């Protein structure tokens, strides 16, 4: 579907995103942990969005998905569905390797990167419509590789620098109903699995 043929839901999401922070709820980029004022504000504790575990060498870390929603929407249920699907694929691809599943809101690796392969996703939700893009990274503070998973999206870049918000590289062309999320996740697993296999040590 061409951009000129956006569905009403897709158009609404694009307009919301264009209006800025007052109308959309994209997760903010992580601040620089070396900034003294940032460190002081957390009183020595790490940002709760940073995984408290780097995983194990030779294993995989299944991060909590990033969530981008229109105003007033929530995607916690959808994020849990996506993480469960990521875990299932990771256990199949990395058979026998340790799989470290991180809780909400741990959705990025520590500053030095994860010790194992890191897999995650971006869940974009507008009202009752969803889109999902999977992310896969090799161990260390390296680029994340993106692959479309649910709905029709345009990836402006397939590789995103470490800890940079992937959603800034994603444009949703057409959403799918969130009610069909489980079916869509299962139907499009092969692309995500293939990316994981290419990234596996």
Image: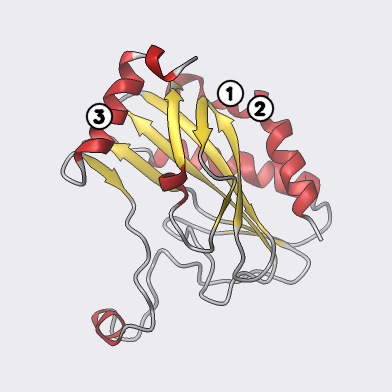
- What label does residue 184 carry, if any? 1
Please identify, in this view, whether the residue under mark 1 or under mark 3 is nearer the observer.
3
The quadrant where residue 62 appears: bottom right
Q: Which of marks 1 and 3 is nearer the N terminus?
A: 3
Q: Position of residue 11 (x, y in %)?
A: 31, 21
Give x and y (percent) for residue 167.
Answer: 43, 45
Circle 1 packing at 10 Å, graded few (<14), some (14-19), many (20+), is some
Q: Distance between the residues labelled 1 and 3?
A: 25 Å
The one nearer the camera, 55 or 146, is 146
Distance of mark 2 from mark 3, alpha carbons? 27 Å
Q: Is residue 179 above or below residue 54?
A: above
Front of the two marks 2 and 3: 3
Q: Which residue corresponds to the image point at 80% horizontal and 60% vertical from the top-left?
A: 97
Task: Report the colour scheme.
Answer: secondary structure
Left/right of residue 174 with respect to residue 141 in the rendered view: left
In front: 83, or 139? 139
Upstream in the sequence, badge 2 or badge 3?
3
Q: What element carries label 1?
A: helix
Residue at image coords 43%, 54%: 165
Measured in 3D between alpha carbons, the distance from the residue under mark 1 to the one under mark 2, in whole angstroms, is 6 Å
For this view, does 45 lie left or right of residue 72?
right
Q: Do the residues labelled 2 and 3 touch (CB within 8 Å)?
A: no
> Which residue in the protein does label 2 denote?
188
Q: Is residue 82 left or right of residue 98?
A: left
Query: x%, y% of residue 180?
Result: 50, 19
User: In percent of the image, x 69 and y 61: which residue is there?
Assistant: 138
Is the C-beta separation of discs 1 and 3 under 8 Å?
no
Residue 15 tag number? 3
Q: Mark 3 falls on what kind of element?
A: helix
Q: Do the residues labelled 1 and 2 touch (CB within 8 Å)?
A: yes
Picture layout, residue 1 above or below residue 52 = above
> The C terminus is located in which quarter?
bottom right
């Amino acid at each position: 579907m061409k951009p000129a043929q956006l569905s009403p839901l897709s158009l609404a999401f694009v307009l919301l995103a264009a209006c800025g922070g007052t109308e959309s709820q994209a997760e903010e980029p992580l601040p620089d942990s070396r900034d003294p004022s940032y460190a002081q504000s957390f009183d020595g504790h790490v940002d709760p969005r940073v995984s408290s575990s780097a995983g194990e060498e030779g294993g995989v870390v299944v991060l909590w998905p990033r969530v981008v929603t229109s105003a007033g929407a929530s995607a916690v249920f959808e994020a849990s569905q996506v993480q469960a699907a990521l875990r299932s694929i990771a256990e199949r691809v990395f058979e026998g390797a340790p799989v470290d599943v991180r809780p909400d809101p741990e959705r990025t690796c520590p500053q030095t990167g994860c010790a194992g392969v890191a897999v995650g996703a971006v869940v974009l939700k507008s009202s009752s419509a969803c889109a999902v893009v999977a992310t896969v990274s090799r161990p260390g503070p390296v680029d994340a590789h993106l692959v479309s998973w649910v709905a029709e999206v345009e990836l402006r870049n397939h590789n995103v620098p470490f800890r940079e918000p992937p959603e800034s590289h994603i444009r949703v062309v057409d959403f799918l109903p969130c009610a069909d999320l489980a079916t869509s996740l299962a139907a499009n697993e092969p692309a995500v699995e293939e990316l994981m296999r290419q990234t596996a040590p």
